[in-house]
Structures are given as C-alpha cells and as structure tokens.
Image: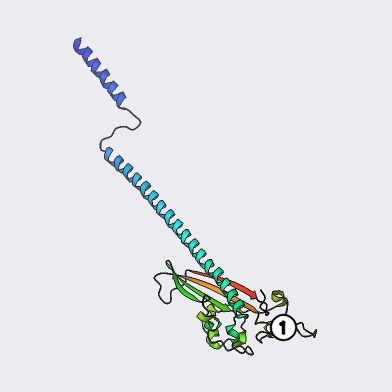
C-alpha cells in the first residue's frame, strides 16, 4: 500500500510540474540566442535610422542657411550698386551709357556683351566674400538691335549673357515712344514738342536704364565654373539736367 500511494503522489507531482511549465512562450531549447540576436538587430536598425534622420536634418538646415546667406549677400550688392549708380549720375550730371559711345550720334557696334558693361568703381567687382566668389556686373540697357554684331548673335554663351534691350515708351517716361525718338545730344533737356505730329524727345543724357547682375560661385573657384546663384534686377534712374536734387 505504501508503494502505491507513493506512485500516485509521483504522478500528481509530475502533472503539476507539466502544468506549471506551460506558458505563452513555451520554452524551447536553442531559442535564447536567436531571439537575442533579433532584438540586437532590431535595435541597431532603429539606431541607424535615427542617426540618418539626424544627419539629413542637419544637412537640410545647413543648405537652407547657406541659401539664405547667399540671398542676403546678393541683394546686399544689388542695393549697394543702386546707390553707386545714383551717386555717379548726380556727380557727373549725366547718365552712364557705354553703348551710345562718346559722340552719341550713332551707337558704336557691339562685338561682345562686355561692350555694354559699365566699368566704374563700385559698379564692377570681382571679389571674394567668405566662402563665395562674387561677380558684380552692370549693363546698359539703352542699346539697339542693329548695334549687335554677328559675334554676339552667333555665340550662344554671349546670347545668354546679353541683357534685355530697353524700348523707351511713354508709359515708362511719360514722353517719347521709342529709342528712335530719343535725344542723343548730351546735356540737352527735354523740350515740349511744338509739332503735334512729332513725338517728344527723350533725353538719354538724363535717363539711365541698367541691369544689375550678381553671380555667386563656390570656392575654390576655377575658370568655367557655373555660378550657384544668379540674381538680377533692372534699375531706372532720371536726373534733373539742371543739377538740382
């Protein structure tokens, strides 16, 4: 009898142990190491993703900051150049027109876009600002198409640099209708037209129209590098021929 009771107890104890060993994740031999590796791999992926996100965010913020600083630099040169043009015109009591030549009777032939450049102190600069090369150019817009030679018209790179041509209209100045009606005699003010059939004259000696172009390049700079930013603005200025402010 004693032996039989012992067997019954052993069977009950065995059953209890079997019930206790059952869980949501049944214990299996050899699964601990693979599960640990899976958790490590998953954690590594999360860390790598977070790191890449942080690096991308930093690069984006740096790029935005760089674009903003380039914009501020370019517009700063444009505003400074406007003041320099006005100061030069008021000092000389006349506008700046390299495209019209010295005698102003007939505009000189333009063999290159550089013939429209105003190479005056403060109006043409090729300098370095921080980590940027700055090229400032001011072009005269009062040229005419018949002045352009084939060296410009047949050269695609020159045509890309060519500023727009200004056609003087009454809406722009309140007088005149085109460049053909412009007075090219220096210092002669506008006069009321006595004849109704003839359009009023525009005194180009007192009127200037210019394109201010600022190009920014990365440093180090090599000849032929393309600008990373090109900012342009047209600027018009009329002065009193009498010299009154």
Q: Quadrant of the N terminus?
A: top left
Q: Residue at x 48, y 62 (%)?
A: 69
Crowding near the residue tagged with mark 1, few <14, some 14–19, many ≥20 C-alpha atoms within 10 Å: many
Q: Residue at x 24, y 15 (%)?
A: 9
Q: Residue at x 61, y 77 (%)?
A: 90
Image side of residue 85 versus residue 43, left or right: right
Whether 69 is drawn above or below 122: the answer is: above
Q: Quadrant of the C terminus?
A: bottom right
Image side of residue 129 versus residue 29, left or right: right
Nearest the viewer among 42 and 56 is 56
Q: Residue at x 33, y 46 (%)?
A: 41
Q: Quadrant of residue 237?
A: bottom right
Q: Which residue is mark 1?
A: 201
Image side of residue 6 versus residue 210, left or right: left
Whether 117 is drawn above or below 74: the answer is: below
Q: Looking at this rendering, what residue extends furthest in the top direction?
A: 1
Residue 47 % position (x, y):
36, 47
Q: Looking at this rendering, what residue extends furthest in the left direction?
A: 3
Whether 130 is drawn above or below 124: the answer is: above
- Residue 95 visible: no
């Amino acid at each position: 009898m004693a032996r039989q009771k012992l067997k019954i107890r052993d069977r009950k104890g065995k059953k209890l142990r079997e019930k206790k060993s059952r869980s949501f994740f049944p214990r299996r031999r050899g699964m601990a190491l693979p599960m640990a590796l899976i958790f490590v791999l998953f954690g590594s992926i999360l860390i790598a993703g977070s790191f890449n996100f942080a690096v991308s965010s930093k690069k984006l913020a740096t790029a935005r900051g760089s674009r903003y600083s380039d914009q501020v630099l370019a517009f700063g040169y444009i505003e400074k150049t406007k003041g320099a043009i006005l100061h030069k015109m008021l000092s000389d009591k006349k506008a700046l027109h390299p495209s019209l030549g010295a005698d102003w009777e007939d505009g000189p032939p333009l063999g290159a876009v550089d013939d429209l450049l105003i190479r005056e102190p403060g109006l043409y600069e090729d300098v370095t600002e921080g980590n940027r090369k700055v090229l400032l150019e001011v072009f005269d817009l009062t040229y005419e198409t018949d002045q352009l030679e084939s060296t410009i018209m047949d050269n695609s790179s020159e045509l890309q640099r060519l500023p727009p041509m200004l056609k003087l209209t009454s809406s722009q100045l309140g007088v005149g209708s085109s460049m053909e009606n412009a007075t090219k005699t220096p210092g002669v003010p506008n006069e009321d037209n006595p004849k109704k059939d003839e359009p009023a004259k525009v005194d180009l000696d007192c009127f200037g129209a210019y394109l201010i172009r600022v190009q920014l390049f990365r440093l180090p700079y090599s000849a032929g590098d393309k600008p990373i930013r090109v900012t342009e603005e047209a600027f018009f200025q009329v002065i009193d021929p009498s010299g009154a402010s």
